[in-house]
Amino acid sequence: GENVEQHPSTLSVQEGDSAVIKCTYSDSASNYFPWYKQELGKGPQLIIDIRSNVGEKKDQRIAVTLNKTAKHFSLHITETQPEDSAVYFCAASISGYSTLTFGKGTMLLVSP
Amino acid sequence: SAVISQKPSRDICQRGTSLTIQCQVDSQVTMMFWYRQQPGQSLTLIATANQGSEATYESGFVIDKFPISRPNLTFSTLTVSNMSPEDSSIYLCSVREGTTEAFFGQGTRLTVV
């Protein structure tokens, strides 16, 4: 089955800095890669996703890049704000299957 | 997007008892999933709730411990049976239509004492 590794486990940045979280996956058949943000006491919320036919996707301050050859994808947050502080999860889904495999999460702390 | 309501949002239960968690979706969906998130950990898939048939369980999870019902395309329940402190976790309901986005409920925070 699919295995997703996520790094780092914690990330502390100053407000206004950029943050990068990286994930690798094992199954070359995976073709869908979402990122979720989970705030304390809440369920995960989808913030951006990318499919394997695209190398990069951007939505305002958030971007995701995908390298299919190396089987890794990254989340980039620019101009970080304190409200970006949360746990971020990457995930992967194999083509034709509905189940998602999640990374272990990254706790992002943005200090004012 | 789908709006998912989970009940209860949290509960404290005595060991040996059972708790049923409800998941209601505001639209008909084919795929509903139940996840467990242990404190400070990632999401682990428990099972896929199939409408009109038995749930499909992942390795390490069994029907006797986590019975699931899926009576229609908008509702599902997960029961955590004969609870022990090790079952203390957040339980999350999720929906996904084919290979589109997956959405999550707010979770049920369970503490077993």
Image (tube, helix red, strand yellow):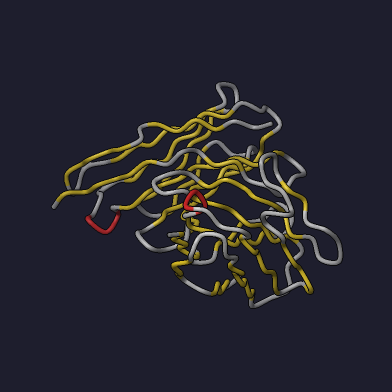
Seen in the image, is A77 located left or right of residue B81?
Answer: left
Could you say where residue B102 lies in the image, as x and y percent from the top left?
61, 57
- Front-most of A43 and B103? A43
- Front-most of B107 and A23? B107
Residue at 48% from the left image edge and 32% from the top image edge: A23
**Rendered view: A81 above or below A55:** below
**Rendered view: B41 above or below B48:** above
Residue placed farthest to the front in the image?
A: B16
Residue placed farthest to the bottom in the image?
A: B26
Residue at 63% from the left image edge and 37% from the top image edge: A52
Q: Quadrant of residue A77?
A: top left
Could you say where residue A65 lies in the image, as x and y percent from the top left?
48, 36
Residue at 55% from the left image edge and 36% from the top image edge: A55
Seen in the image, is A111 located left or right of residue A27?
Answer: left
Which quadrant, please, contains the N terminus of chain A?
Answer: top right
Residue placed farthest to the right in the image?
A: B52
Residue placed farthest to the top in the image?
A: A70
Residue at 76% from the left image edge and 68% from the top image edge: B70
Could you say where residue B23 lies in the image, as x and y percent from the top left?
62, 71
- Front-most of A15 and A106? A106
